[in-house]
Amino acid sequence: MPARAAEIVSAEPPRSQQTGTFVGARLRLPLDGETRTPRATLTAARTLHSVQPSGEARMRIGQGLEFGVQGSELRLDLAGRPVSRLVQGGDAPGGPRSNLSTIGWVAVGAVVVAVGVFALYGLCGSGEICDVED
């Protein structure tokens, strides 16, 4: 009779995790009594959905690309940081560098979205990503 091997059992029970993407609107309201202002954004971010062996399920939404309003300020953030801070001004070979204003970054974001929508429309019309009969 052949010998059977024992299963290796981990001390920690297995967990189920799935990654995904959240694209939608977010509304952040401070509920802890701080003086922070409410924030409304359109967001595209990574998610992590996990299920514990006890049946508890959690979904965490990370910080991705966000465009929105905080107080009276328009903001474009990448990974939780304003894009205007990612490109800090400094000395360039031709003299001091000037940064884009918030309106400039909003215009850049709008152009990127418009180009993306136009490209998806073209791919769909040619039948690359969707059925031509639809």
Image (cartoon, helix red, strand yellow):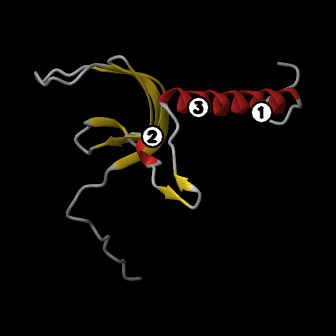
Residue at 25% x, 19% y is 29
Q: Nearer the viewer, mark 1 or mark 3?
A: 3
Comes first in the chain, label 1 or label 2: 2
Q: From the viewer's perspective, is residue 15 above or below residue 69? A: below
Q: Secondary structure at mark 3?
A: helix
Residue 49 position by quadrant:
top left
Comes first in the chain, label 1 or label 3: 3
Residue 55 lies, in percent from the top left, at 26, 37
Q: Which one is nearer the viewer's eye here, 55 or 48?
A: 48
For this orientation, the residue located farthest to the left is: 33
| Residue for badge 2 | 84
Residue 73 lies, in percent from the top left, at 38, 22
Instruction: Give the CA separation, mark 1 to mark 2.
Output: 27 Å
Residue at 36% x, 77% y is 4
Instruction: Give the CA separation, mark 1 to mark 3.
Output: 15 Å
Q: Nearer the viewer, mark 1 or mark 2?
A: 2
Residue 70 position by quadrant:
top left
| Residue for badge 1 | 119
